[in-house]
Image (cartoon, coloured by chain):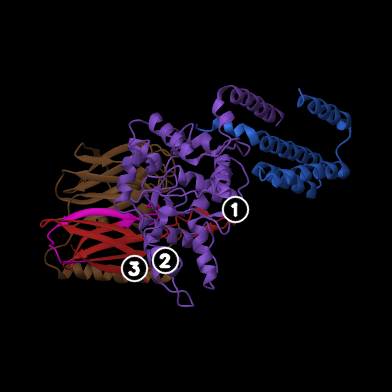
């Protein structure tokens, strides 16, 4: 299934560097992709409140120097933003299923 | 509870002074000779009590016995904990006061009403309830205390956000 | 400014039914505002109803009385046209009073 | 998090399959037909709740639950929106700095016209709601616009709703493709799932009116705006239609849009049109 392919990749990816702790560079990369996905969701006028709060949590953890938690939070924010984008696109037609006729 | 500020305390002294003068001056007392604590003075102490038993003792100084002559009307599930319509009616006579106690609130005593001669023994009001709680209404009639109890379910609304 | 007390007093000859709705925040002192500071307690403590020079009904309220409080009771011994004086004082010493004609 | 989106995908693909099989009508009617939509919408609720009198639907949760209706009727004896109503009446009578009043901005002095809002403005090519018209009136007379979610706007709309109490909702859709598009856009918004909870307005107000979400009983979508603005015990204050839309969004964990943005104006247009014929019962009191 389309969805599980990136899932497997993500898993493989996160296993590889598990040995060394995430540093600021990892965090910055993860945060950038999360923020881009969040902007796209906002563009579709379908942002989730949890995406916004998780991004904020990532920033807060990074400010506190805890880059492990910050990177994890940024990755979660990315997943949330991607799910809201998926929801917006699939709802373009799916809403008709619920319509009272 | 915050203690009352300076000016208020002096205002209360004046009130007490006026009340005592009124009591001396007037022939017929506007209030039936009820328990001293339940006349004009604001029962500060009773409102400070946390649980229901202490509040009843502080306000009336004795216990109440359940009576089916006290009809307490309150919803089974409160539409909203901030505005719960509650009312009491009773067939007892010579009623001098009616009080409401919300057991699970931070302070049990919610409200107490003093009745003059000729005032029908009954009252309706809207109370706040912090969570699902036992609600007790006490009627003081001819110096004795009668009570009615009902449970009111209280939860928040909405799906969480 | 209109009074903070709205009252309806209607008599059927013998019994007068009184309903009052008062505009007041009735803050408990246990709630925080959006910035996290505690909103100080601010609630009506005593509300008196006086008719023909006699206190017919006195309410002593704590913090558990709802915002914009409402109370309803009835009493005998008054007739249409009599004045019903309502006044309240709160824990900050503020007060308001109004007089209504029994309809 | 992964399971969440997998679940999402699973339910959506099931819905897509179901959609393909069951709706022959969509194939035929690509044209937007508001009148047919309104008829189908009203019949859905009349059949789902045969014991509820048609005009009772405007009482929201109270048409669904007897015990709550009793609590409501007790409150209605001396309703908490009394102060907002008086404030609105006073504001309507108080002239702006330039001497004009709201009455000069509205037909019939703003009295008894709430049931015709929102309307489609053919010059602007967009839906204009009562709240928007009130703020435009203020700006036209050199005054600052009010917040759409605060008490002043609620007091004004409370007074205007009160002057229309009992009048049937009377929303018109001109034969203008932009008006039909606005209606369709409002309908789409109403049925579109959003937020991490993945709910649409219909998930609560069409699929499960009368059921509880914790303490609250859900109102039916039919006539849901007829009682606006409402005093909500939950907010212990007045709420305009804008405030209700914004809070409903955040309940499903969707970031709300700006009050009076196109989607909100269009969904108000849709919901008001399908409630045509049902009486205005604002201002209302709700849990």
Residue B73 lies, in percent from the top left, at 28, 41
Dot 3 lies on which element?
loop
- Please name the residue that numbered disc 2 is placed on: C92
- Residue A46 is inside the magenta segment: no
Mark 2 nearby-residue class (10 Å; few <14, some 14–19, many ≥20):
some
Of the pair D62 and D189, the residue shown nearer to us: D189
Chain ID at mark 1: D
Asked whether the residues under marks 2 and 1 belong to the same chain, the reply is no
Of the pair D263 and B146, the residue shown nearer to us: D263
Q: Does residue D57 show up?
A: yes
Dot 1 lies on which element?
loop
Kindly indicate which chain is depicted in brown in the rendered structure.
B
Dot 2 lies on which element?
loop
Residue C72 lies, in percent from the top left, at 26, 53
Picture quarter with the C terminus of chain C: bottom left
Asked whether the residues under marks 2 and 3 belong to the same chain, the reply is yes
- Please name the residue that numbered disc 3 is placed on: C3
> How far separated are the C-alphas under marks 1 and 3?
38 Å
Q: Check the image and report above or below for D126 versus D100.
A: above
| Numbered range of the magenta stretch | C60-84
Kindly indicate which chain is depicted in purple in the rendered structure.
D
Chain ID at mark 2: C
- Residue C67 is inside the magenta segment: yes
> How far separated are the C-alphas under marks 2 and 1?
43 Å
Instruction: Tell me which residue sits at (67%, 30%) in the image.
Output: D4
Of the pair A52 and B22, the residue shown nearer to us: A52
Instruction: Tell me which residue sits at (59%, 51%) in the image.
Output: D262
Which disc, if any, is residue D261? Answer: 1
Chain ID at mark 3: C
Instruction: Tell me which residue sits at (34%, 35%) in the image.
Output: D52
> How far separated are the C-alphas under marks 2 and 3?
18 Å
Residue C24 lies, in percent from the top left, at 39, 61
């Amino acid at each position: 299934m389309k969805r599980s392919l990136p899932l497997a990749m993500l898993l493989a990816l996160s296993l590889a560097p598990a040995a060394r702790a995430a540093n600021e560079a990892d965090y910055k990369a993860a945060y950038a992709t999360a923020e881009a996905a969040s902007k796209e969701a906002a563009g579709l006028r379908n942002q989730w409140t949890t995406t916004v709060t998780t991004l904020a949590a990532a920033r807060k953890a990074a400010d506190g120097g805890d880059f492990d938690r910050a990177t994890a939070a940024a990755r979660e924010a990315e997943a949330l933003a991607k799910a809201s984008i998926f929801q917006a696109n699939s709802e373009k037609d799916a809403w008709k299923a619920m319509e009272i006729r | 509870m915050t203690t009352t500020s300076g000016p208020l305390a002096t205002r209360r002294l004046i009130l007490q002074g006026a009340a005592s003068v009124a009591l001396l001056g007037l022939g017929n007392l506007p209030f039936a000779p009820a328990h001293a604590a339940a006349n004009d003075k604001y029962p500060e102490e009773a409102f400070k009590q946390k649980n229901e038993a202490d509040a009843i003792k502080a306000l009336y100084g004795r216990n109440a016995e359940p009576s089916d002559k006290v009809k307490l009307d309150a919803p089974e599930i409160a539409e909203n904990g901030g505005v719960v319509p509650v009312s009491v009616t009773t067939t007892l006579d010579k009623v001098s006061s009616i009080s409401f106690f919300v057991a699970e609130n931070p302070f049990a005593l919610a409200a107490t009403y003093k009745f003059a001669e000729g005032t029908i023994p009954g009252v309706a009001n809207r109370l706040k309830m912090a969570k699902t709680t036992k609600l007790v209404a006490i009627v003081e009639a001819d110096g004795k205390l009668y009570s009615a109890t009902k449970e009111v379910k209280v939860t928040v609304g909405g799906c969480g956000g | 400014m209109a009074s903070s007390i709205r009252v309806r007093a209607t008599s059927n000859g013998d019994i007068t039914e009184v309903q009052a709705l008062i505009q007041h925040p009735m803050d408990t002192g246990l709630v925080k505002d959006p910035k996290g500071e505690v909103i100080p307690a601010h609630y009506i403590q005593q509300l008196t109803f006086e008719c023909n020079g006699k206190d017919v009904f006195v309410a002593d309220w704590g913090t558990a009385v709802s915002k914009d409080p409402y109370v309803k009771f009835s009493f005998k011994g008054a007739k249409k046209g009599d004045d019903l004086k309502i006044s309240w004082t709160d824990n900050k010493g503020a007060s308001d009073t109004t007089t209504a004609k029994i309809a | 998090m992964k399971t969440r989106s997998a679940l999402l995908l699973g339910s959506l693909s099931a819905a897509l399959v179901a959609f393909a099989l069951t709706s022959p009508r969509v194939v035929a009617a690509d044209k937007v037909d508001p009148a047919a939509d309104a008829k189908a919408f009203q019949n859905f609720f009349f059949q789902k709740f045969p014991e509820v009198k048609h005009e009772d639907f405007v009482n929201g949760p109270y048409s669904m639950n007897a015990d709550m209706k009793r609590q409501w009727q007790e409150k209605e004896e001396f309703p908490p929106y009394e102060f907002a109503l008086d404030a609105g009446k006073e504001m309507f009578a108080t002239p702006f700095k330039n001497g004009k009043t709201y009455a000069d901005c509205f037909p019939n002095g703003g009295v008894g016209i709430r049931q015709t809002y929102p309307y489609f403005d053919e010059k602007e090519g967009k839906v204009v709601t009562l709240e928007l018209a009130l703020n435009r009136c203020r700006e036209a007379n050199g005054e600052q616009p009010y917040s759409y979610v605060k008490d002043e706007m609620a007091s004004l709309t409370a007074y205007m709703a009160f002057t229309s109490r009992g009048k049937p909702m009377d929303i018109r859709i001109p034969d203008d493709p932009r008006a039909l598009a606005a209606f369709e856009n409002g309908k789409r918004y109403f049925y579109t799932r959003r937020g991490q909870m993945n709910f649409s307005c219909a998930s609560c107000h069409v699929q499960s009116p009368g059921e509880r979400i914790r303490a609250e009983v859900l109102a039916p979508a039919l006539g849901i705006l007829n009682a606006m603005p409402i005093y909500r015990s939950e907010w212990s204050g007045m709420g305009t239609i804008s405030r209700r839309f914004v809070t409903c969004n955040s309940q499903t964990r969707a970031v709300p849009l700006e009050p009076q943005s196109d989607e909100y104006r269009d969904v108000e247009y849709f919901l008001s049109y399908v409630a045509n014929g049902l009486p205005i019962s604002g201002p209302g009191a709700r849990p």
